[in-house]
């Protein structure tokens, strides 16, 4: 009796020797680890990103020695995953390159040109939203003055700070990949804010129809910048998190871009960040998770170090990808029967 071909993903923290052995055995993997670990990995079928923050089975973890691995188990070896490098000029092809039936895992280095292009333009890329695309933004320890990088396994220990890496994974017809977002935030009842242009840095804006400056507005109204700006992107609530406010120059730096033509509100305050996050995880169907990642801001504001996020594990990142760039969310993908 024949067994249907299938894809499954093992998500686990592993030691360096085990990861090297898996690479040498030809396994397909996505890897999250500190740069000092990634640069020791041999050539193979893997993509990686720099990060020392993780959701582990023991709880939130900060470690320069830990390695989080997603291993793609493929019972249809005649149709293997495909690994691709993209730069700022070619990243618009990512959805066109995706398998007709399957999913794509992508890692982009924080603050790179390819990250900025993806953040600003991904919703308009050809074929976007036809095939699930999930992934994360690589980073570094917040105490370091460093640069985020990604690793390209087929090129050995090739680490890059201006390219993205992706793994396109075909699925058999009887399986489906589903992308899910856990977001604590909803638009608040404060003024409607819009911006004259798309970008990661803003100042001039329109506040309830009147000309204003976002930095001055934040200062004058005592806005808690742990609460992001929130807008409705075609039915999905998307956060834009505040990175830095400079009232002297009237400048606000953001972790994701705001878009011209959309209306934003600062989110409703979350009284107990950790409880709200835990409750939201419990409300979601987190069975059959094949991949997940969580934002570094959730880690910081929920004080997640040493605390568990249910049974969800994965890297804690400088941004999340669920088709487009997100912030202050937990993104996960499930594999289910069609």
Image: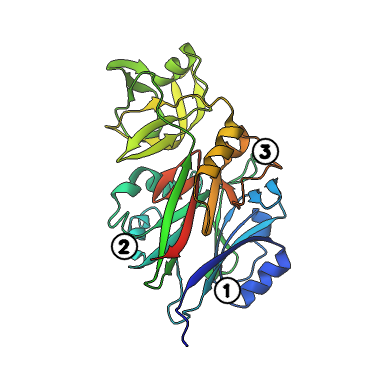
Which label is found at residue 27?
A: 1
- In x, y percent, where is residue 316? 59, 47
Q: Residues within 10 Å of mark 2 (few under 14, many from 20)?
A: some
- Relative to 90, 126 lies left or right: left
- In x, y percent, where is residue 208? 30, 17
- In x, y percent, where is residue 12? 64, 60
- In x, y percent, where is residue 246? 50, 21
Seen from the viewer's position, the closer of residues 338 and 330 is 338
Which label is found at residue 72?
A: none
- Relative to 209, 328 lies left or right: right
Q: How many marks?
A: 3
Say if 203 sits above or below 74 in the image.
above
Seen from the viewer's position, the closer of residues 103 and 150 is 103
First in sequence: mark 1 vs mark 3: 1
Seen from the viewer's position, the closer of residues 32 and 232 is 232
Of badges 2 and 3, the one in the foreground is 2
Residue 71 found in image quarter: bottom right
Q: Residues within 10 Å of mark 3 (few under 14, many from 20)?
A: few
Q: Which residue is mark 2?
A: 96
Q: Which residue is mark 3?
A: 143
Residue at the image point whose x is 42% and y is 50% from the top: 322
Residue at the image point whose x is 49% and y is 52% from the top: 332
């Amino acid at each position: 009796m024949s067994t249907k071909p299938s894809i499954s993903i093992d998500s686990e923290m592993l030691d360096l020797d085990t990861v090297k052995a898996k690479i040498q055995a030809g396994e397909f993997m996505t890897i999250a680890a500190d740069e000092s670990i990634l640069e020791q990995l041999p050539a193979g079928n893997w993509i990686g990103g720099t990060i020392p923050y993780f959701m582990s089975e023991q709880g939130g973890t900060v470690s320069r020695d830990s390695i989080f691995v997603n291993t793609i188990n493929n019972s249809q070896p005649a149709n293997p995953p495909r690994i691709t490098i993209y730069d700022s000029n070619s990243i618009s092809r990512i959805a066109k390159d995706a398998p007709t039936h399957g999913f794509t895992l992508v890692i982009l280095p924080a603050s790179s040109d390819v990250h900025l292009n993806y953040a600003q333009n991904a919703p308009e890329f050809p074929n976007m939203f036809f095939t699930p695309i999930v992934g994360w933004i690589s980073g570094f320890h917040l105490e370091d003055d460093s640069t985020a990088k990604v690793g390209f396994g087929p090129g050995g220990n090739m680490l890059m700070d201006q390219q993205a890496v992706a793994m396109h994974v075909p699925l058999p017809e009887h399986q489906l990949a589903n992308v899910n977002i856990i977001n604590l935030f909803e638009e608040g009842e404060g003024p409607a804010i819009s911006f004259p242009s798309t970008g990661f840095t803003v100042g001039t804006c329109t506040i309830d129809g009147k000309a204003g400056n976002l930095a001055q507005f934040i200062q004058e109204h005592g806005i808690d910048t742990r609460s992001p700006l929130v807008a409705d992107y075609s039915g999905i609530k998307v956060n834009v998190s505040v990175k830095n406010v400079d009232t002297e120059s009237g400048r606000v730096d953001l972790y994701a871009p705001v878009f011209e033509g959309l209306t934003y509100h600062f989110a409703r305050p979350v009284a107990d960040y950790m409880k709200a996050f835990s409750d939201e995880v419990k409300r979601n169907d987190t069975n059959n998770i094949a991949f997940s990642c969580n934002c570094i801001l959730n880690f910081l504001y929920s004080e997640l170090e040493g605390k568990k996020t249910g049974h969800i594990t994965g890297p804690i990142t400088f941004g999340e990808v669920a088709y487009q760039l997100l912030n202050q969310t937990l993104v996960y993908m499930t594999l289910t029967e069609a």
